[in-house]
Image (tube, grey):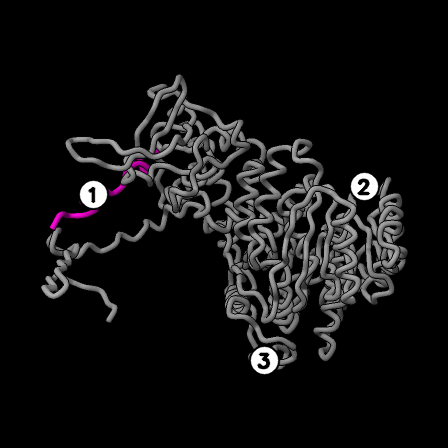
Amino acid sequence: MIGAAEHGFIDTQRNLALICESDLLGERVARRRQDSRRTINPDTLIRNLAELHPGQPVVHLEHGVGRYAGMTTLEAGGIKGEYLMLTYANDARLYVPVSSLHLISRYAGGAEENAPLHKLGGDAWSRARQKAAEKVRDVAAELLDIYAQRAAKEGFAFKHDREQYQLFCDSFPFETTPDQAQAINAVLSDMCQPLAMDRLVCGDVGFGKTEVAMRAAFLAVENHKQVAVLVPTTLLAQQHFDNFRDRFANWPVRIEMLSRFRSAKEQAQILEQVAEGKIDILIGTHKLLQSDVKLKDLGLLIVDEEHRFGVRHKERIKAMRADVDILTLTATPIPRTLNMAMSGMRDLSIIATPPARRLAVKTFVREYDNLVVREAILREVLRGGQVYYLYNDVENIQKAADRLAELVPEARIAIGHGQMRERELERVMNDFHHQRFNVLVCTTIIETGIDIPTANTIIIERADHFGLAQLHQLRGRVGRSHHQAYAWLLTPHPKAMTTDAQKRLEAIASLEDLGAGFALATHDLEIRGAGELLGEDQSGQMETIGFSLYMELLENAVDALKAGREPSLEDLTSQQTEVELRMPSAAAG
C-alpha cells in the first residue's frame, strides 16, 4: 500500500521507526504557495544544483554578481550544513546556506565572460540595483499605460454562432490536440470580450498554430469584420494564402494576398477592394503596414513570427494594439515576447503537444566532411524524400550547387534564394513542392513557413553563423509528416568557432525534443543577452544586474504601480522566514 502518513509509527517486525513532520513540529506544515507576484522566469531559476558549474556567474540578491565555486560542508553553531561557495572581487568568498538558495539566480544578460564581478561590502551593487530599479519604474509605467489604453478603449465583442462555427470545425481533417483545443477556446473567449485581445500563441513548428488562427479568422468574418494576416516572407504569404483558401473553400469568404508575387496592377486592385470592404481576409508581408493599405473594418490582426519584423514595423503593430484584436503566433518566442507574456502583460497560450505520429527531428552537429554530406543526401533521396541544403551566401551559391552535383550525381538539384526574380523563385518552390527535383540548395528564405511533407533532411553549412531561434526554425522545415527527419549542422573546426556559437549548437542538439521552442527561447536569452527585451536603454541595466533580477524588479514595479504605490526594493528582500530542520542523514539504532 502506498499513501501519505499523517503520524509516525513503529513497525516491530521490521525494526523500523517512521517519524513524520507532524511528530517533530507539532503540526503538518502546509507548503507555502509561491507569492504569485514573484513569477520569475522559471528557466533562470536554479531548480537543481547540478545546473550550476564552477566558474559560472550567479547573482546574489544582496551581494551582487559573483562566481559559483562549488559546494562545501561547514559547521556553524555546532551544526554541520551544506553551503554554496561564491567568489567575488579580490578573491573574497561568500558562503550561502542551501536554505537561502532563493536569494541566488543564474546570471543571464550577456556572455558569461562579460558578466561583472562585484566587490563584497562595496556600494557598487546597491547603486547598480537602485539605478536599475529607477529605470524599471519608467518601463513599468509605459507598459501599464499601453495596457490601460487598451483596457479603457471599448473593443468589439464578437458574437459566437456555435452552429456555423461547428460546421467549420468539422471540416478540419485532423483531431485537435488538447493544447490546441485549449488555445482555440482561450482565443475565442478573448474575442467575445469587449476588450481588445492581445494573445501570444507559442507552439513549436508544425504543432497546429495556423488552425488556431483560422478559427479566430472565421469568427471575425462571421461578425462581418475584416482580418489581416501579417507574415515576414513572401513565400510564407503564398503558403498561408493557399492554406486559407483551401480551408475556407466551402464558405463565401473572399481571401486575397498582397506581396511581391503580385503585379502593381493587381496590388492596386486589391487595395481598392479591401478599402471598399469587398475582401474579408487579406494576407501579406509588411506591405500590409504601409499607409496606403486601408481596411474598411479591421477586426482581427494575426501576426506570424513577430520577431522577424523590424523595429519600425513592430512599432506600427504596437500602435494598433489598443484598437483591434491581435493574435500573435510564434514557434520560438524571442525574449521580449516571452517575457512580456510571462509578466502577465500579454495573454499566453502554449501548444506543447505534438500531433499524433509526429517524430522528433534527429539532430547531428558535425565538422564539414564530403562523405557525411554525400551519405546524408543519398539516404534521403533513396527513400524517395527531398533535401534542403542551406548555403547562406548568394554570391557563391552556384559553386556550392556545382560541388554537390559532382559529389552526388544521383541527385536532381535546383537553387532558390531571395535575390531571384519573384516569378522565378515561385516557380522553383512550386517545382520542389511537386518533387520535380529532390535537392534544393537555398538560403534562409526557406526559414519561415514553407510546408513540404516529403522534405525530411536539412543540411546546414556553417551552422555556427546562425542564431538559436533561426536554427530552430530551419530545423522545423523538415519532419512535417510521420517520417523520421534529420538535421545535419555542419561546422568548421571547433577552433574556428566562437564560444557562443559552440554553445548555441550544443543547445540546439540537446533540445531535439518535440516542443523545444519554449526552452530554446530562454537558452537564446542567456547566449545573446537580453538587449532586445525592452530596447537599448534597458540592455545596460540587464547586463549589470542580470536578467532574472531585472524581471523581478519589473514585475515588482508593475504590481506596485497597479496598486497605486511607488515600487520599493524592500518588497524583494522581505521574504518569509523558512523553518530549517537539520537532521543527521542516518540515526544509530
Q: Nearer the viewer, residue 503 or 410?
A: 410
Residue 432 image point, x, y percent: 83, 62
Q: Secondary structure at mark 2?
A: loop
Q: Which mark is residue 393?
A: 2
Q: Earlier in the sequence, mark 2 or mark 1?
A: 2
Q: Earlier in the sequence, mark 3 or mark 1?
A: 3
The residue where tag 1 is placed is 580
Q: Which residues are magenta?
A: 569-589
The kind of residue on which mark 3 rests is Gln
Work out whether 509 lies above or below 269.
above
- Residue pictured at 59% horizontal, 58% vertical: 204
Per the image, the residue denoted by label 3 is 166
Residue 413 in the figure: left or right of residue 126: right
Residue 316 appears in the figure? no
Q: Is residue 533 visible?
A: yes
Q: What's the residue type where badge 2 is placed?
A: Asp
- Cα distance between the residues tagged 3 and 1: 56 Å
Identify the secondary structure beneath mark 3.
Answer: helix
The residue shown at (56%, 57%) is: 513
Classify the position of the N terminus by image quarter.
bottom left
